[in-house]
Amino acid sequence: MSQPKYQRVLLKLSGEVLAGGARFGIDGAQVKLLAEELTEVHRTGVQLGIVIGGGNFFRGISSAAREMDRVTADSMGMLATIINCLAMQDALEKQGVPTRVMTAIHMNQLAEPYIRRRAIRHMEKGRIVVFGGGTSNPFFSTDSAGALRALEIGAGVFAKATGVDGVYDKDPRKHEDAVQYAHVTYNEVLARNLGVMDASAVAMCRDNNMPIVVFNLKKRGNIMRMTMGEPVGTLIGA
């Protein structure tokens, strides 16, 4: 097998990925399949950090959240991400992969507090690190948390796994004539409001020259292809 292009990767997963075909909660079979794929990547020597969203829980109560204070609602969303992190840790460890959950919100009975140097050391020792709790601050999405963690741990790429093949000039789920980009610049994403992720996350990566790869998680093997540097999805860069 060829050598991976990226030795350290920050992978951003949506919470909905863990729900599988359901709209709410966690699908154990889907999490197991994802853990198997991540295990294959881990065995190539790639150091993996993972940020998971909380949409599979929080979007189920989003109508109620509209009546809430924004800070309270965002705090609930951050807690939902930690539920997903624990589920992923359990699935990965059943595959024999040592895994650590680190959270920006301290809850020592469940997970380690996020400390940058400790996270890097875990990865150097061959452990997958799953980051929960977002940034611990309201008004910041898990996209921004993913970009921040990618920069802090010195990842070679910020990889965002989605349900479509990459970045398009318009929503491919609504427009049959949507055109996919193989490569697009940070500024084009922001200027055209392509909506692939939060503008703050794109700007953070742009300002620190962190490449972003957006790819389709539903096609098995794409995580491996992405780490090997194969042309998967869309590359966002300078």
Image: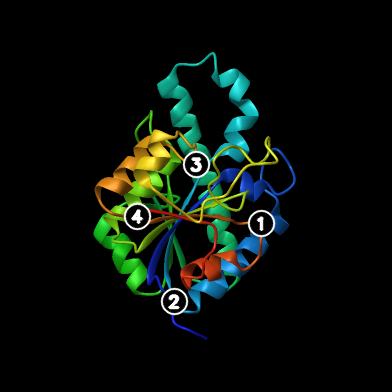
Q: Do the residues bearing badges 3 and 1 touch, measured as CB atoms within 8 Å?
A: no
Foreground of the two, 36 or 167: 167
Mark 4 or mark 2, whichever is nearer to me: 2
Task: Name the side, left or right, on which 74 lies relative to 95.
Answer: left
Is residue 46 positioned above or below 167 on the image? below
| Residue 196 marker | 3
Residue of label 1: 218
Secondary structure of the residue carrying tag 3 is loop
Q: Do the residues bearing badges 4 and 2 touch, measured as CB atoms within 8 Å?
A: no
Q: Quadrant of residue 35?
A: bottom right
Sequence-wise first label, 4 or 2: 2
Alpha carbon separation for disc pair 2 and 1: 21 Å
Residue of label 2: 4
Tell me residue 238's x, y (percent).
32, 53
Tell me residue 111's x, y (percent).
42, 52
Foreground of the two, 137 or 159: 159
Alpha carbon separation for disc pair 4 and 2: 17 Å
For image coordinates 58% across by 32% down, the residue present is 58
Task: Name the side, left or right, on which 2 lies relative to 139.
Answer: right
